[in-house]
Each structure stands twice: as C-alpha cells, then as structure tokens.
Image (tube, helix red, strand yellow):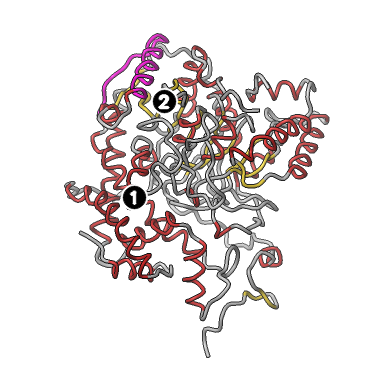
Amino acid sequence: MSLSPDDVKRIARLARIETSDAEAQATQAQLNTIFDLIATMQAVDTRGIAPMAHAQEVFQRLRDDAVTETDRHAAFQAIAPAVENGLYLVPKVIE
Amino acid sequence: MSDTSLSTLAAQLAAKQVSSRELAQTYLDRIAALNPSINAFITVDPEKTLLEAAAADALIAAGQAGPLTGVPIAHKDIFCTDGWLTTCGSKMLHNFVAPYDAHVIQRFKAAGMPSLGKTNMDEFAMGSSNETSHFGPVKNPWNPAYVPGGSSGGAAACVAARMAPAATGTDTGGSIRQPAALCGITGLKPTYGLVSRYGMIAFASSLDQAGPMAPSAEDCALLLNVMTGFDPNDSTSLERDKEDYTRDLGKPLTGLRVGLPREFFAEGLNNEVAAAVDAAVEELKNLGATTVEISLANSKLAIPVYYVLAPAEASSNLSRFDGVRYGYRAPDYASLDDMYCKTRAQGFGAEVKRRILIGAYVLSHGYYDAYYLQAQKIRRLIADDFNEAFKACDVILGPTAPGTAFKLGEKSDDPVEMYLNDLYTIPANLAGLPGMSLPCGFDTRGLPIGLQLVGNYFSEAKMLNVAHQYQRTTDWHARAPEGLK
C-alpha cells in the first residue's frame, strides 16, 4: 500500500493542517516508509484475539452529580488569543 | 558537589547543615553556568524557586518536614504548572502559562520540594533525541556533539550534568528510559495507572505514564513515594493502598530469577552494549540471582503496533490545539476553518504533523479494521507474552536501547531509523508494565550504556531493589561527566 500526494492532502484536510503541494510531496515519501514498517503487522494471524484498548481492566468511575468546579473563567480567558465580554472570539461562522 | 543523593540532601536539610534556599541557589547557579551550552531547561525562574525553597525552610523550622522537604527538583515541561510557562516543547504552547497544577506537580509541592524549572523535551513528547523541540535540541552532557535521547532529554541531561538532583519525566514508548540510558542516569516508568495523568499534556493516553529520573534507584524509590497515589481527576488512576517503594531496598537477591528475552539480544544490538549488559548479568549472578532464557516472540511487532496506536490517540488528543482558547493562533486567516488549518500548520513541528497524519489515516473510514484494530489485537499478544514469561522469572532484563547516544542530526532525516531506538522500551508501554533503565557501563567513546529491567505489574519495589543491589556493588550511576564547570 502506498499513499499518493492526494491521499496526504486528504488526510491533512481531515486533521485540519494546511499543507501545500510541495509539503504533501515531501510528507508522502516519509509516510510511506512508516507505512511500510506498519505493514509488517498484516502478516500476523489475529483471528479470535480480543483487541486490547487499555493496559488495565478499567471502567469509568461515576461521581456524585454535584458542582465541584469553581468559576475560573477570568483566569482561563486571560490566556486566550482573543476574548470580548467573557466570550472567545473567532471569525464569523454564520452570516 | 560530591554526594547529591536525595537521602544525603534530605539528611543535611534535616540537620540544618544547609537550608533549602542555599541548596536551591547552588543548583540555580549551576543551571546559569551550564544551561547555555546544554539547553536542558526551557524555563528557569529563580525568584519562584527561591520562594518555594523559603516555604520549605519554614516547614523544616516548624518541624513539619516530610522525607524530601526542601530538596529541589526539575519538572518536564509537559506538566502544567500554575503560573509557569508550560510549552510541551511546542510553538503551539510557546506562550501558555498554565492556570493550574498537574497532579504530579501538586504532589511535589505538597512534599515541600521546590521546582528548579521546566525541562526541555521533544515536541509533545514525540521523539527519541530531543531534536524535535521548538526550543532547540538538548546536548548530551557526556559529549555535546551527541543527543541526550528523548523525549525527556532535558530531564535526563540536567540530572546527568548535576544541574538538578532529580527530575520528573514521562514515558509513552521509552521517553524516560531511553534518555536515562543515553545520559547515564536511572529512570523508572511505573505500572500504567499508578501516577495520575491529570495536567500532564496528553500524547497517547493509554500509554502515557510519568515517573522519576535521578542518579540512583534509591533516589527513584523516594521520588516514587511522592508521585504515586489515587487521583479522582484521572479516570485511569488506580485505587490502591499506598506503598513504600523503599521497603525492599536492602533485601538480598538470593533466588531472584532474571529472565533474558532472546529477542532483546538478537541482531541490531550494538556489541559494546551487549557486552556491558552481559557483564551486569554476571554481577547479578554474583549477588545470588539465577538466569532463565525467555521469549517475547511478538515484541518485534511492538514498533509497528506502537506507530498505529500512539499516533491514533495523538491525532485525537492534539485536536484540542485549535488556536481558540489558549496557545498559538495564526496571525492571518480568512475563516474559522482557515484559522484552524493555518494555526495547526504553523504551530506544530514536522514530526508532530507526521504523527497526526498517520493517526488520522489509520482511524479513517475503510482503514480502521486493517490498522487500528489489528494493532490492538497484536498489543494483546505482546502483553500475553509477558504474562507467560513472568511464570518463569521475577524480572526481565535486557538493554534499554540498541546503541549508545548518536550524533545530533545523524537520524533526524529518517523517522523510521529514529523509531527503531525504542525497540526494547515500547513493549512495556503496550503491556502497561513497569520498566526502568540504569547505567551499566560506557562505550569506547565514553558514552553511557543503559540496562533495562521490566517487572510484573506493581513490582516496582522489587525492581528498585534489584537496581539498588547492583548499584551497591558498581559505581556507574555515581559517575558524572567531567569538565563541566
């Protein structure tokens, strides 16, 4: 399996990373060497093996349905790129 | 400074032979002298450090000191630290002053241990040489033409150069153990779930684990006592009784069964590393251990499995960096979507982008079963190999890395060549097992060689004692690079 520059641009689009044609070209070669390495997995017979998502048998704990956080929006917004009236500013989405 | 073991420093503080402020100042002076050439720290803030040290002195004076109160420590720049710049080695967070403390930071603060600063690292912990840091590479204190390893390269280098008596690190595929090996110090990645990941900037959440880095195993045991413990803020934090990781130090190794995986001594291993590891095995036999050959047959698949699972998790975790709420935002953009795309194109470095792209691809429609699910199934096979091996042995021993430190720039153009560095460390992450690296010699160029121990789940105390007994009869861990002034 081998990625084309168009594949690279498609994935970069999914990942929201702007990529020029020249960058896609360079990235394609490197990704293909990595996917060659990954491809060695395909030869392994894993029929009947349960996928392992996690190192420990963990389950999501539930906590009491109570407010535990304090209001720290001023501290959090102090480090934001752009805020106004307690809101994060981004370019207009809906006309 | 001669003996800087944590137990010695703590005893001097308790006996009031030195104050925490004096100790912190000594290290700050050494950082000021050495950091311009080593680049182990991204942020140093002497004023904050000395305030924390003064608070520790007050605790000592009031008789409220814990075992390590007043001993300073350096923190990897992956841990959110309230009021400190926390960059994770990335342009994306070059201006991010964290508004809260990571759980690990909270614990060291509660123990009264002043922070000496934030250490350099590969960007978002993705790298094995520290060359992917936005803040420039770290130099190996044993020879500045060589890399310190990564991703906790700044942590390993600052301890090796005695700029800090200890440091925190994180390990997703070897990021504590490999730099510890390349810099000649001791480092431990605990069992997954022992140390809370709260406030530790996420790379691959099912693999990430924080741990201690210091000259000796005894130091690491003392630090682990501070770091571990249940935290409701991390859904994978384990609820277990508190352990004293120093409790086994001093037990004889008589009857210890050391497993030697034949796959870890096969082709690809540097001869000098193999010889040093063999010599360490002989030393452990002299101390009463026996050896047994074991097989981790699927471990050769650990790298391909890791380079599916870790990027998949990373592509999801790093989607939060969008230029909206904190960190870098591109200066010019036409729309919201364009702002995301340009912010991420400009804010992430090449290696981070590569891994996000791999992750986005293996999770995308039509490829999920062939890559992601297949990798998770082989992950189970790798973990099963360890379970089987631990029926025949108490601890597994092998090299930490296939070679010693390599030259800056030597592998930075070839991602796959770089990835192969973590051949022996990744299996423990995939299984969630504890692993550690300790120094066991030097190559002919004078660069340190690391020995790896992998233990069964929750066997940290036993592993630390194996390392401790070895370090009582050898002095590799006590050596520091000469010529650093």
Query: Crowding near pointer 1: few (<14 within 10 Å), some, many (20+)?
Result: many
The N terminus of chain A sits in image quarter: bottom left
- Which sits in the foreground, B153 or B373? B153
Give the residue pinned by disc 2.
B451
Chain ID of residue with mark 2: B
Q: Is residue B474 above or below residue B20?
A: above
Q: Is residue B302 above or below residue B181?
A: below
Q: Quadrant of residue B275?
A: top left
Amino acid bearing label 2: Leu
Which residue occupies 26% across, 50% down? Answer: A38
Which residue occupies 55% across, 68% down? Answer: B323
State the separation of the CA atoms marked 2 and 1.
24 Å
Q: So how many labels did they put on this image?
A: 2
User: Would residue B196 be found to the left or right of residue B300 on screen?
Assistant: right
Magenta segment boundaries in residue numbering: B272-295
Q: Is residue B52 above or below residue B373?
A: above
Chain ID of residue with mark 1: B
Q: Is residue B322 above or below residue B299?
A: below
Residue B294 belongs to the span the image colors magenta: yes
- What numbered label is drawn on residue B288? none
Are the residues under marks 2 and 1 on the same chain? yes
- What numbered label is drawn on residue B307? 1
Residue B199 lies, in percent from the top left, at 58, 51
Amino acid bearing label 1: Tyr
